Image (cartoon, grey):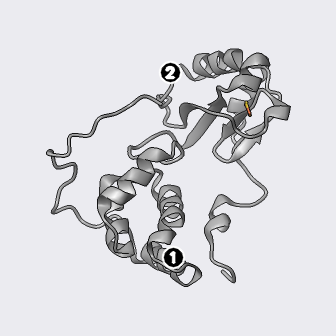
Amino acid sequence: MSWKAYDRNQPVMDPQAPPVLTEAVREKIRSFFPRYETKRAVLLPALHIVQELLGYVSYQAMKEIADLLEIHASDVLDVVSFYTHFANHPKGRKTVMVCRSLSCELMGGKAVLEAVKNTLQIQEHGTSTDGQYFLVTEECLAECDHAPCLKINERTYHQVKATDVSRILADEKNAELSIARSSLFDPPGH
Ligand code: FES
């Protein structure tokens, strides 16, 4: 991931902008409060909920999450910018994550990455023209024994060959999981 400098003297959002978090989203985030000792501890579930619903976590959303959790907006920005899984800008509907660590590189990961770039006609951190895919590389996806690996959203593909890539990307159901992502962030009993 390339570094990005934030000019903290420049406002990054319109103070008059209407809220982006609906009451239903706020209520879902609040429903996590009893599970943790502090509201701050709900930050990661809150970010996952918001990113899943909005596609990314805008500065406006970060401010609203901060208000809800009674923390500073810069604390939310720190977490969003630390984890590559969170985006602060609009991106493709699905994220393709290609592993760039050693095991995958030794097993042909670079060729897989090139095949993804060529198929989608984008570079890293780019979104395909149809808005379907956003491409990033990632450190070890923790499945080195199946290298080379890539993920589409939360679904992992093992032992991928460059020649498999166009077929995988053409499959409309390529990001489907047996457990819906959102259910991972539902409180017990929901
Ligand atoms: S090096 Fe690619 S999954 Fe670990």
Ligand 1 image-quadrant field:
top right
Q: Which residue corresponds to the image point at 68% horizontal and 31% vertical from the top-left?
A: 169
As helix, strand or loop, the secondary structure at mark 2 comes to: loop
Q: Which of 181/34 is in front?
A: 34
**What amino acid does circle 1 point to?**
Lys
Q: Does mark 1 have its CB less than 8 Å from ligand 1?
A: no
* Vertical side of 105 occupied by 146: above or below: below
Q: Is residue 168 left or right of residue 132?
A: right
Q: Which residue corresponds to the image point at 67% horizontal and 65% vertical from the top-left?
A: 184
Visible residue check, residue 173: no
Label 1 belongs to which residue?
A: 28
Q: Which mark is residue 123?
A: 2
Whole-percent x and y of residue 16? 15, 63
Q: Which residue corresponds to the image point at 55% horizontal and 31% vertical from the top-left?
A: 135
* Vertical side of 179 occupied by 155: above or below: above
Whole-percent x and y of residue 147? 80, 28
Looking at marks 2 and 1 on the same chain, the residue that comes earlier in the sequence is marked by 1
Visible residue check, residue 172: yes
